Image (cartoon, rainbow, N blue to C red):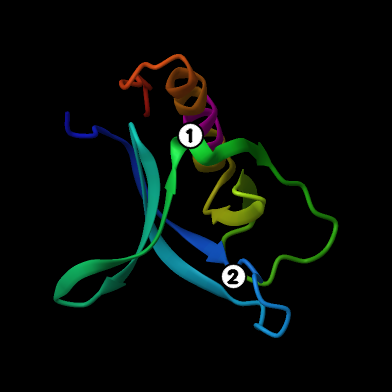
Amino acid sequence: MFPRVILKGTMIKKSQQKKRTSPSNYKERLFVLDTQELKYSERRTGKKPMVKGCIKLNTIKCAETVFSDVPIPCNYKYPFQVFHDNHYLYIFAPDNDCRQRWVRALKEGKQLEHQGTRYVVIAVG
Protein backbone atom coordinates (compact mmCIF):
# COMPACT_ATOMS: atom_id res chain seq x y z
CA MET A 1 0.00 0.00 0.00
CA PHE A 2 1.35 3.41 -0.95
CA PRO A 3 1.45 6.13 1.71
CA ARG A 4 -1.05 8.97 1.35
CA VAL A 5 0.09 12.59 1.81
CA ILE A 6 -1.62 14.31 4.74
CA LEU A 7 0.17 17.68 4.84
CA LYS A 8 2.83 19.38 2.77
CA GLY A 9 4.48 22.76 3.21
CA THR A 10 7.61 24.87 3.46
CA MET A 11 8.89 25.58 6.96
CA ILE A 12 12.22 26.19 8.67
CA LYS A 13 14.13 23.43 10.48
CA LYS A 14 16.67 24.05 13.21
CA SER A 15 19.81 21.91 13.12
CA GLN A 16 19.52 19.02 15.58
CA GLN A 17 22.92 19.56 17.24
CA LYS A 18 23.71 15.83 17.31
CA LYS A 19 27.41 16.71 17.52
CA ARG A 20 28.59 19.10 20.22
CA THR A 21 30.74 21.10 17.80
CA SER A 22 28.14 21.56 15.06
CA PRO A 23 26.79 25.10 14.67
CA SER A 24 23.17 25.99 15.33
CA ASN A 25 21.58 26.93 12.03
CA TYR A 26 18.18 27.26 10.39
CA LYS A 27 17.30 25.97 6.93
CA GLU A 28 14.18 26.20 4.83
CA ARG A 29 12.84 22.74 4.00
CA LEU A 30 9.86 21.23 2.22
CA PHE A 31 8.05 19.03 4.78
CA VAL A 32 5.76 16.17 3.78
CA LEU A 33 3.73 14.20 6.30
CA ASP A 34 2.19 11.01 4.95
CA THR A 35 0.51 8.01 6.52
CA GLN A 36 3.88 6.41 7.34
CA GLU A 37 6.51 9.13 7.89
CA LEU A 38 7.53 12.77 8.12
CA LYS A 39 10.08 13.74 5.47
CA TYR A 40 11.91 17.00 4.87
CA SER A 41 13.72 17.94 1.70
CA GLU A 42 15.97 20.64 0.31
CA ARG A 43 14.46 22.44 -2.65
CA ARG A 44 16.77 22.75 -5.65
CA THR A 45 16.03 25.07 -8.55
CA GLY A 46 15.10 23.11 -11.66
CA LYS A 47 15.65 19.76 -9.91
CA LYS A 48 13.73 17.28 -7.83
CA PRO A 49 13.89 18.07 -4.06
CA MET A 50 16.61 16.17 -2.19
CA VAL A 51 15.37 14.30 0.91
CA LYS A 52 17.48 15.40 3.89
CA GLY A 53 15.63 13.55 6.64
CA CYS A 54 12.90 11.00 7.24
CA ILE A 55 11.17 10.10 10.52
CA LYS A 56 8.90 7.06 10.71
CA LEU A 57 5.63 7.81 12.52
CA ASN A 58 6.17 4.84 14.84
CA THR A 59 9.36 6.47 16.21
CA ILE A 60 7.68 9.79 17.08
CA LYS A 61 7.04 10.03 20.82
CA CYS A 62 5.32 13.44 20.79
CA ALA A 63 4.69 16.65 18.87
CA GLU A 64 4.08 19.85 20.82
CA THR A 65 3.84 23.60 20.37
CA VAL A 66 6.86 25.50 21.74
CA PHE A 67 6.59 28.91 23.41
CA SER A 68 9.83 30.81 23.82
CA ASP A 69 10.83 33.94 25.73
CA VAL A 70 14.06 34.25 23.75
CA PRO A 71 14.13 35.88 20.30
CA ILE A 72 13.71 33.46 17.39
CA PRO A 73 16.56 34.02 14.89
CA CYS A 74 14.64 33.07 11.73
CA ASN A 75 11.74 34.59 9.76
CA TYR A 76 9.17 31.98 10.79
CA LYS A 77 8.23 32.69 14.42
CA TYR A 78 5.89 29.80 15.34
CA PRO A 79 7.93 26.82 16.60
CA PHE A 80 6.90 23.28 17.44
CA GLN A 81 8.93 20.23 18.36
CA VAL A 82 8.87 16.59 17.33
CA PHE A 83 10.52 14.16 19.74
CA HIS A 84 11.77 10.96 18.09
CA ASP A 85 14.58 8.48 18.68
CA ASN A 86 15.80 10.52 21.71
CA HIS A 87 16.18 13.66 19.55
CA TYR A 88 14.17 16.86 19.29
CA LEU A 89 13.42 18.26 15.85
CA TYR A 90 12.49 21.96 16.03
CA ILE A 91 10.37 23.25 13.16
CA PHE A 92 9.26 26.85 12.63
CA ALA A 93 5.94 27.53 10.88
CA PRO A 94 5.05 30.81 9.13
CA ASP A 95 1.93 31.37 11.28
CA ASN A 96 0.07 29.93 14.26
CA ASP A 97 -2.66 28.25 12.17
CA CYS A 98 -0.01 26.38 10.16
CA ARG A 99 1.76 25.31 13.37
CA GLN A 100 -1.49 24.05 14.91
CA ARG A 101 -2.39 22.05 11.76
CA TRP A 102 1.00 20.32 11.78
CA VAL A 103 0.99 19.53 15.51
CA ARG A 104 -2.59 18.19 15.30
CA ALA A 105 -1.81 16.12 12.19
CA LEU A 106 1.32 14.63 13.79
CA LYS A 107 -0.58 13.76 16.99
CA GLU A 108 -3.52 12.24 15.12
CA GLY A 109 -1.24 10.37 12.74
CA LYS A 110 0.70 9.00 15.71
CA GLN A 111 -2.48 7.87 17.51
CA LEU A 112 -3.87 6.10 14.48
CA GLU A 113 -0.49 4.56 13.66
CA HIS A 114 -0.48 2.98 17.14
CA GLN A 115 -3.92 1.54 16.46
CA GLY A 116 -2.62 -0.08 13.29
CA THR A 117 -4.63 2.21 11.02
CA ARG A 118 -2.78 3.37 7.92
CA TYR A 119 -5.10 6.21 6.86
CA VAL A 120 -5.53 9.59 8.52
CA VAL A 121 -8.32 11.96 7.57
CA ILE A 122 -7.60 15.61 8.36
CA ALA A 123 -9.52 18.62 7.16
CA VAL A 124 -7.00 21.29 6.19
CA GLY A 125 -8.25 24.64 5.13
- Principal secondary structure, stretch drawn in magenta: helix
The residue lying toward the viewer, choosing from 9 and 3, is 3
In the rendered view, tell whether residue 108 sits above or below residue 10: above
Left or right of 6? Residue 98 is right
First of labels 1, 2 by sequence position? 2
Query: Which amino acid type is shown beneath numbered disc 1?
Result: Asn
Residue that carries the numbered disc 1 in the rendered image: 58
Residue 72 sits in quarter: bottom right
Residue 29 sits in quarter: bottom left
Q: CA distance from mark 1 to mark 2?
A: 22 Å
Query: Which amino acid type is shown beneath numbered disc 2?
Result: Ser
The residue lying toward the viewer, choosing from 27 and 83, is 83
Left or right of 106? Residue 5 is left
SS class, disc 2? loop
Residue that appears at 29% across and 70% down: 43
Residue that appears at 33% across and 31% down: 35
Residue that carries the numbered disc 2 in the rendered image: 15
Identify the magenta region. Answer: 103-107
Left or right of 96? Residue 69 is right
The residue lying toward the viewer, choosing from 104 and 74, is 104
